[in-house]
Amino acid sequence: MKLKRKNVGAGILMVLFTVLFFVLTSKFFLVASSQSAEGVDLIEYGKRKWMKSDVLDAKRGTMFDRNGEVIAQDIPSYSVIAILDKNYPNHIKDPEAAAEKLSEVLDTEKDELETLLSKEGRFQVEIPSGRKVSYRKKEQIEKMKIPGIDFLRESRRYYPNQTFASHVLGYTGNGESGVQAGVMGLEKSLDKYLQEKDGKITFVGDAFSRAIPANKESITPPKHGQDVYLTLDEKIQLYLDEAVQEAAKKYKPEKITGIVADPKTGRILAMTNSPSFNPNKKDIKNYTNYAVSYPFEPGSTMKIFTLAAAIQEGKYNGNEVFQSGSYKLPNIGRPIYDHNRRGWGPITYNEGVQNSSNVAFSKLVREKLGYEKFRSYISKFGLDRKTNIDLPNEKNGSILYNYEIEKVTTAFGQGSTVTPIQQIQAATAIANNGKMMKPYVIDKIMDPETKKTVLSNEPKVAGNPISEATAKQVRDILETVVTDGTGKPYMIDGYSVAGKTGTAQIPGKDGKYISGWGENVFSFLGMAPKDDPKLLVYVAVERPKVEFPEMGSTPVANIFTSVMKSSLQYLNIQPEAKQKKDSVNVKKTYGKELPDYTGQSAKEAKSELEKLGMEVSVIGSGDEIMKQEPYEGAYVMKGERVILRTSGDAKMPDVKDWSYMDILRISKLLGLKETITGSGFAVKQSIKPGNPVKEGDFFVVQLEPPMETEPEKKENKQDSDTTSEEDTEEDLPITD
């Protein structure tokens, strides 16, 4: 009986197992055929669970200078992460100990780190102060051997030369997808070339994303960005950057811009601005590349192109004499004055160029060249349109040419505006024997893997405004500006320099020009060596903080001479064995170095100075000279005022028509506390002529421009209250 029951039980179990086997087998074949279970796609589920992927980092394109030196590149950086999941073999075991060690190298308090490392329910955390650390700091942390600490490798943009051409290069930021993208400068304008595309690797991995051996991998290779080669020269750019930074530190100007170009090709070898910034830190105070995006009244550098136009048209006779000082235009209330108001008497046009005479250039354009012909040369030199340089955000200036006064003042650089890069392009015609070269900064773009050239630039002639003979004659005359005229501070030992100084007035918010010592844009446009210029340099400094008697042009001269000389030597341009004699018939009117007149007779000193063409003011009742302004050793030009303080009581002279500089000199000489309002020349004074003065007296002087024009309509705010003077500082030598 018992045996029978056992057989029945065994039969039931066999039936159950058979049914179960049939069900499971059916289920298996059903799943195998449909590849799903309970609505879940098992293939996709398996992929999600076991198929892992990693990003293969691509590199953004590298930027190089013209010699192949790296100036912008991607470098690896590391972000510190802490694995908190206790199921993972390598996790944070002691948050307190880990926090204490990390606080030694990361800029975070221990307690804050410990709180972060003790979080529950997180697989891992990223330490904020450990983002994008350097390789050196990564090594420091690795040496601590902290369990659970790991690193995420990523790329960051690095600029090895810090502030090097920062407004040209620009910088990058993280785009919406987290990929680097250009934000400014060439990084932005060339983003489509520089942009990288990450690759991908797919593999079978365990629960901790570790690859399981003997399984196939699927790889999509990364596509690196294309490399950009610029025309910039690292050495010359560093010369310019350092000189500008030194001037910015010492003189604290509002703005500085500088450009160095190869006039034979149009290649930009260096370009900088101040304020600058370090793209590694993005400490940006100024986003504007003044060299291409800041039009302003150029001042007397514009006279270079007026002179060239007159010579090209056969309307210039350098030996012809004209009366300097002032020039009356019909239907204009006040005459145009030279910058010192008095002029230099009857002088030749060559001397007028030397002395930067506004009258000379007004007469040239009105009486000899003609307004329409001059306007055509403004176009021929490209001063009325963009250069189309391959840099972003280039602006165009504004040529005011509706009224006669605008046409005349444009000839000597007032009213109309241009950018520094427009002046550089125009000046290549002077330096390059009549051929005007288009400026450019991108030499070529190459694929880093195939080495195939994607884009290439070559020198391009932008125009032929003048002949070779005209260009040579202009350079000869501009050389005398440096050897014997307003550009004397720009002389470089061993090299002949041709160039022109400029002082531009700055319109205020009320449309009137601002006034004050140093309240101008001071500039110089020069080339060297004169006979075959290898370099063309433009420097402009706006509103440097200079104290009288130091000139506003001092930082400009410091930058120009330093950069030009260093660059010529670096390029192995040999110094000229002997400075050539003047090839232009000009008198050396730059003046003389003042001797020490103290202790001498005022009557005799006055007679001597007047014979040299100086204006002399004697203050004091005695004859023995006690003090003088300018001081001993200063250079003075013909027509400049020299003030002699003698023994005895001092009485205030009539300062009507005295310049800003003259007022500063008499105030310094007599120890007065001066207040000067307006710009131009004195029209009112608080201490009446003949009244006694003593040290510490307050002296208020009102200045007015030598010419004010009110045309029927003002086309441009900058032209309201146009004046003919460049500035009382223009065309005076730098004194140390």
Image: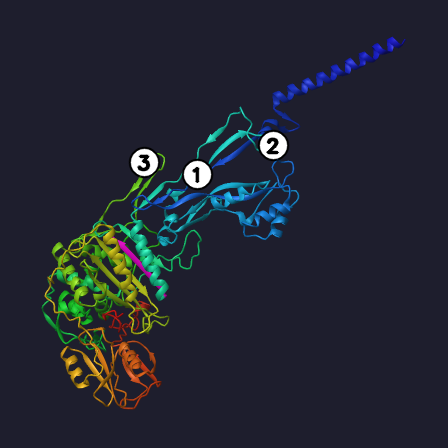
Whichever of callouts 2 and 1 sits on the residue coming sooner in the sequence is 1
Image x and y of residue 135, in percent: 47, 44
Q: Residue at x 74, y 14 (%)?
A: 18
Q: Is the N terminus in the top left, top right, bottom left or bottom right quadrant?
A: top right
Image x and y of residue 375, in percent: 20, 62
State the CA–CA distance, disc 1 to disc 3: 18 Å
Q: 31 and 455: which one is in front?
A: 455
Q: 85 and 372: which one is in front?
A: 85
Secondary structure of residue under mark 1? loop
Q: In this view, does 324 lie to the left or right of 628?
A: left
Establish if 611 lies above or below 242.
Answer: below
State the CA–CA distance, disc 2 to disc 1: 27 Å
Image x and y of residue 260, in percent: 27, 55
Residue 285 falls within the magenta-colored stretch: no
Classify residue 687 by image quadrant. bottom left
The boundaries of the magenta stretch are: 252-261
Say few, some or many: other residues with alpha carbon within 10 Å of mark 3 (under 14 / 14 to 19 / 20 or more).
few
Establish if 251 lies above or below 434.
Answer: below
Residue 207's disc is: 2
Q: Mark 3 points at which residue?
A: 452
Q: Mark 1 points at which residue?
A: 58
